[in-house]
Image: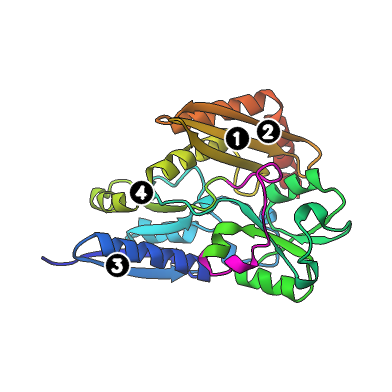
Amino acid sequence: MANFKLTIASRRSKLAMVQTLWVKEQLEKNIPNIDVSIEAMATQGDKILDVALAKIGDKGLFTKELEAQMLIGHADIAVHSLKDLPTNLPPGLKLGCITKREDPSDALVVSKKNDCYKLESLPAGSIVGTSSLRRLAQLRNKFPHLNFKDIRGNVITRIEKLDSGEFDCIILAAAGLKRLGFKSRIHQIIPNEISLHAVGQGALGIECKTDDKEVLKILNVLEDKSTSQRCLAERSFLRELEGGCQVPIGVNSKIQNEHLCLTGMVASLDGERLIKDQYIGNINDPEEVGKELAKKLKLQGADKILSEIFEQFREN
C-alpha cells in the first residue's frame, strides 16, 4: 500500500518545531503507511520583535502564513499553540483537533539574585517582564508596587534577557518552558487566584481544511476529549466577548463530576478594574458554557471595559 503523504505547516521557532515534531511522531506512530513532512516558516509575529504585540494587532499574528499554505494546497495541516489561534478561522479552514494539554499555568522565572523571592514577596520596584496584556492587567491589580516592562522574542531569547540583567523576573507559560527543557527554571507556578491563564494555553490546536475528510479522520488519533471540552468552552467565552489574544481576558477550566466549570476574567489595562466569575454547565455542550459565562461578565460591565480597550487601540 502506498504511503499517505501529509505536510505540516509550522512556525520555525524552536518551541513551534518541538511541538510540530511531537505531532509528526504521534502520527507516524499511530497511522500505518503515513509519510509526514514539515514546511517551516516565519510568521508576522515572529518577524516584528521591536513592537509590543498589542500594537501590532492580533488577528492571525502567528497563524496567517501557515493558513495560506493550506489554502493554496502546499500543506495539509498546521500546528499551533492553541492560545495563538484566533477563535474565528478563515473560510475553508477549521480546528481539526485539540491535543492533550500540558500545564496551562503561567510561571515565574527569576534572575539568580532574586531566587529567594516568590511573586508575592518581590521588593517594590522590581522589574517584571511580560508581553501579555492579560498577565499585565492581573499582576498590576495584585501588585501595583512592581514595575512592568514589555519583553519580546522567543522563550530562549527572553530567558537570555533576564539572565543579562534587564529584568528581575519574567512571566512565561509553564507549558512552553517544560516542552523546551527549561522546567528547572520555573521558580513558581502562579496560582489561579493571582493570574488566570490564556484561552487554550498549554494545548496544541491542529488546523486543517474543512472539507478534507481523510485528514480529519487521521487527526482523530491526536484528539484529547477532556482537553477539547475545556478549550472549546474557553474559546467560546473569548469569541462571545469579541476579544483577541492581546486583550486582558483570562480563564481557568476544570471538569468536576461530569460538569464543566469555567472561570473567566476581564480587566482594564491598568488593572484597576477586574471582573471575575464562573459558570458550571453541561460537559457535552462546552460552547454553551463559554457563552453563558461571557453573558454573566457582560452584565457586570465586561463589555464596557473591552470597548474602552478597543478604543485605546484605535487611538494608538
Where on the picture, by quarter, is residue 247? top right
Range covered by the magenta-colored residues: 179-198
Q: What is the CA distance from the residue labelled 3 to the residue labelled 1?
A: 38 Å
Q: Is residue 39 left or right of residue 147?
A: left
Image mark for residue 263: 1
Q: State the image coordinates of residue 123 (x, y, percent, origin top left).
A: 87, 58
Q: What is the CA distance from the residue labelled 3 to the residue labelled 2?
A: 43 Å
Asked if one can make out residue 72 in the rendered structure from this viewpoint, the answer is: yes
Tell whether position 184 is magenta. yes
The residue beneath circle 3 is: 36
| Residue type at the position of mark 4 | Glu
For disc 3, the neighbor class at 10 Å (few under 14, some 14 to 19, many from 20) is some
First along the sequence among labels 3 and 2: 3
First along the sequence among labels 4 and 1: 4
| Residue type at the position of mark 2 | Lys
Instruction: Give the structural element (helix, strand or loop) at label 2.
Output: strand
Please give the name of the residue rendered at 53% of the width and 32% of the height, measured from the top-left corner: 261
| Residue type at the position of mark 1 | Thr
Q: What is the CA distance from the residue labelled 4 to the residue labelled 1?
A: 23 Å
First along the sequence among labels 3 and 1: 3
**Which quadrant is home to the N terminus?**
bottom left
The residue beneath circle 4 is: 223
The residue beneath circle 2 is: 276
Where on the picture, by quarter, is residue 271? top right
Q: Is residue 137 left or right of residue 5?
A: right
Image depth: mark 3 or mark 1 in front = 1
Q: State the image coordinates of residue 303 (x, y, percent, origin top left).
A: 67, 31
Q: What is the CA distance from the residue labelled 4 to the residue labelled 3?
A: 18 Å
Which residue extends farthest front? Answer: 116
